[in-house]
Amino acid sequence: MFQRTILAVIAAMFIPLMATSQVTAPESGGPAPANQGPKYEAYAGFGYTSINQVNQSRYGLIGADLSLTRDWGKYFGLSLMGNYYKPPVESATPGNPGDPSVYEVLVGPEIHAQIYNTVSGFIHGGFGYAHTGGEAMNPNSSFAGGFGGGLSYGLSPRWAIRASGDKIGAAYSLIDALPGYSSHRTWNSSATIGIVYKF
């Protein structure tokens, strides 16, 4: 009888300890886990491109460059990129015929990483569509693809300044072009600077 009483007292002493060590499971419908950080990155910038679509034409055009990147993990993302260039840097001359414009829409992977403190870098590639107007191109639309990269300087957890460059190739015709027109393959370089917003 005495032994049973001692065992009952010892068990009663451990009941409060066991109760305090229990972990309450989250109830259904409770608050969602805290956000792990921004998953999207939007960019808008001022850009410059060289356009070499017509023989003896070396236009420099200015315009806008936009992109939206969805991040997966710390280093990888998928980007949708678009740009439009129209006003020439200098007025037309006899050596620069036409009134050119160009726009491109590309999608592709991006690899990015922190380099030092608030400075990060990225490289990306893209495939999509390019259109050139104002130079009597035939055809004036093309499959396009290229690559580029740049640096970002963080101003805050959500805002940054970015400078980048790209080289985009296009194949406007599978056969040799007529005299005075572009070749069947072109490569144009571009550079942009602008603002990044993460959300």
Image: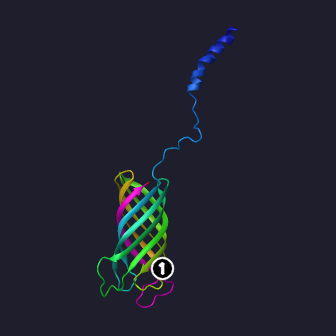
> Along the horizontal axis of the image, is 86 left or right of 81?
left
- Residue placed under numbered mark 1 in the picture: 141
To which quarter of the image does residue 119 belong?
A: bottom left
Check the image and name the residue furthest to the bottom: 179
Colouring scheme, one of rainbow, by chain, secondary structure, one colour:
rainbow
Instruction: Name which residue lies at 42% across and 67% down.
Output: 148
> Along the horizontal axis of the image, is 34 left or right of 156?
right
Instruction: Name which residue lies at 44% across and 73% down.
Output: 104
Specify the amino acid type for callout 1. Ser
Check the image and name the residue furthest to the front: 29
Instruction: Name which residue lies at 40% across and 62% down.
Output: 43
> Along the horizontal axis of the image, is 181 left or right of 1?
left
Residue 45 lies, in percent from the top left, at: 36, 65
Residue 108 lies, in percent from the top left, at: 49, 66
Residue 179 lies within the magenta run: yes
Is 34 placed above or below 142 here? above
Instruction: Give the class, few, some or many, for how many residues have Cα within 10 Å of label 1's Cα (few <14, many ≥20).
Output: some
Is 67 placed above or below 19 here? below
To which quarter of the image does residue 95 belong?
A: bottom left
Is 26 placed above or below 154 here? above
Magenta span of residues: 171-198
Q: Quadrant of the C terminus?
A: bottom left
Is 111 placed above or below 186 here? above
Check the image and name the residue furthest to the top: 2
Q: Quadrant of the N terminus?
A: top right
